[in-house]
Image (cartoon, rainbow, N blue to C red):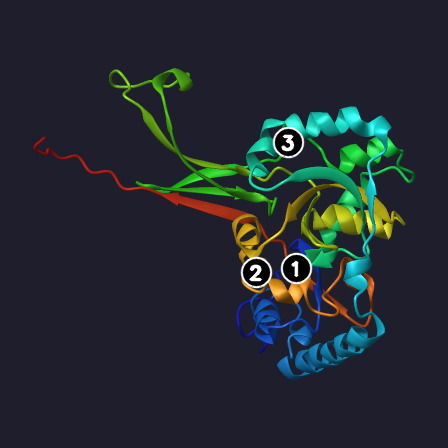
Amino acid sequence: MNSKRNGEALEKGRPTHEEVWLLGQPPLSEFLDFVRDKVSDAEESDAATLTDEWRRANDYYQELEDLESGIADQAQLRELDPKLAPLAAEVLSDPYCRETYDTVPVTIGVVELDRLIAFQKCVTWTYVDRVKSSLANALDPEALFRFCLPIGERETPVRIRRGGSQRYLFKSDSMDMRYHGTRVFSPAQIRDHDTHGPVAGVVGAVVGFGSNLLNVIRADRRMLLHDGYHRACALREMGVTHAPAIIQTVTRADELEVIARSAISKDPDFYFRSARPPLLKDFFDPRIRRVLRTAKMSRVVEVTYKVREFTELE
């Protein structure tokens, strides 16, 4: 599995990113595929060596099941400082927040970072370092709150280009860019658009970003970090142990299926019932983490459409 042979060697001077993987978490094939397709250094792409590393980490997780059995059930959840209540109300009333977290009960509390369950196997550490460099060495409670739960518009550049007569590509450095769904807009909602005649309506494929809030899913005593991995890792690396977060509380599997990523809802027992699931602190454990250097990656959302005109009998 030689990355040069597969055309993955980097040109000299090309930007690269550091990715931190949690070894030992199944499936092994996902880790090997990532290295084969994305890693820039051919010397890091030997399948047998990588499998040995993964196997040792998997054995270590077996040890942790005995040493730290039930640790995820002991995650601390604190009430928010009453002085920050106005900020919490502002976040909960924000339209992005209301639209995103509109299905199950939602609160804002202070969560213990180390014992948050981690469903992501990989974090781009280049972004963690970038986030950390933007922070002051000591965060006061209000600054910490606004860092974890920012609201308002973000200045995130997006490049849009036409890829064909009925195809458009949205490209961004932010991995948070996503398809928001299709909507019908009335003529009054569309401004500064030159047309051939009166507009009947506009069908739009909406592309944008997530709500950008540190978000946790809580089930019984366990809490899983759903969004905000880069900020959580940056804070943990700075010595912060607890942080404000949006908390979605679920009481049954059907709710989890609606609000959680598919990786979580497909195997909820692994995260919420196993003796020792992967935790955020594992990204800092040298026996589990593996640093890989990849080419810089961008997020692309492709939008295609088809138009037909015809007559029909009423």
Q: Which of disc 3 and disc 1 is earlier in sequence?
A: 1
Residue 263's disc is: 2
Residue 119's disc is: 1
Could you tell me the amino acid type at mark 1? Phe
- Crowdedness near tag 1: few (<14), some (14–19) or many (≥20) residues, C-alpha within 10 Å: many
Distance between mark 2 and mark 1 Cα atoms: 8 Å
Distance between mark 3 and mark 2 Cα atoms: 30 Å
Q: Which of disc 2 and disc 3 is earlier in sequence?
A: 3
- Which residue in the structure is indicated by mark 3? 155
Q: Position of residue 176 (x, y in %)?
A: 59, 44
Whether pointer 2 and pointer 1 mark residues with C-beta atoms closer than 8 Å, the reply is yes
Q: Which of disc 1 and disc 2 is earlier in sequence?
A: 1
**Residue pictured at 77% horizontal, 48% vertical:** 232
Q: Position of residue 274 (x, y in %)?
A: 69, 69
- Which quarter of the figure is the C terminus placed in? top left
Could you tell me the amino acid type at mark 2? Ala
Q: Position of residue 284 (x, y in %)?
A: 82, 62
